[in-house]
Amino acid sequence: MASNPEFVQYIADQLAPAGQVTYHKMFGDYGVYLDGKMFALVCDDQLFIKITKEGAALAPQLPKAPPYDGAKDYFLYEDVDDREHMIAFVQATCRELPMPKPKKKKGAT
């Protein structure tokens, strides 16, 4: 089952005060980015946030689950209506994530 684009937009709207939030469709679901860092997946209208030490310290009670069969575990973040906590959690997570590597230009050697 694919994710509803309105749900993904709601997540982006909730996180807007945190920075530049973007999302991209990936195989019927979505990758979610904050300031260029991919930190989450939205699969079947559920928000899965990458596991980091800082995130685990901030919310140790969050359940962990794979977003799809064969994937590693992510935090399953269910309280998407609590904007303040979600922003703090996502910012903590993104502080630990590396910046993405620049894409190579096609035809470059």
Image (cartoon, helix red, strand yellow):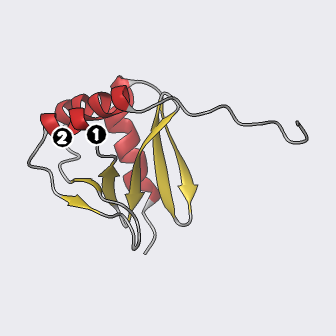
> At 41% from the left edge and 24% from the top edge, which residue is drawn?
19
Q: Residue furthest front?
A: 109
> At 40% from the left edge and 33% from the top edge, which residue is drawn?
97
Classify residue 29 as left or right of residue 50: right
**Is 68 or 97 nearer to us in this picture?**
97
Q: Residue furthest left?
A: 61
Q: Which quadrant, please, contains the C terminus?
A: top right
Q: In the rendered image of this protein, does residue 58 appear above or below residue 43?
A: above
User: Label 2: how many residues lie within 10 Å, few (<14), some (14-19) or many (20+)?
Assistant: some
Helix, strand or loop under label 1: loop
Residue type at tag 1: Thr
User: Label 1: how many residues lie within 10 Å, few (<14), some (14-19) or many (20+)?
Assistant: some
Q: Which quadrant, please, contains the N terminus?
A: bottom left
What is the C-alpha distance between the residues marked 2 and 1?
6 Å
- Residue assigned mark 2: 56
Q: Position of residue 35 (x, y in %)?
A: 48, 27
Residue type at tag 2: Ala
Classify residue 37 as left or right of residue 61: right
- Residue assigned mark 1: 52
Helix, strand or loop under label 2: helix
Classify residue 46 as left or right of residue 9: left
Q: Quadrant of residue 12?
A: top left
Are the two marked residues, 2 and 1, in contact with CB atoms closer than 8 angstroms? yes
Q: Quadrant of residue 60?
A: top left
Q: Position of residue 17 (x, y in %)?
A: 34, 24
**Is 70 or 35 nearer to us in this picture?**
70
**Is 45 or 66 nearer to us in this picture?**
66
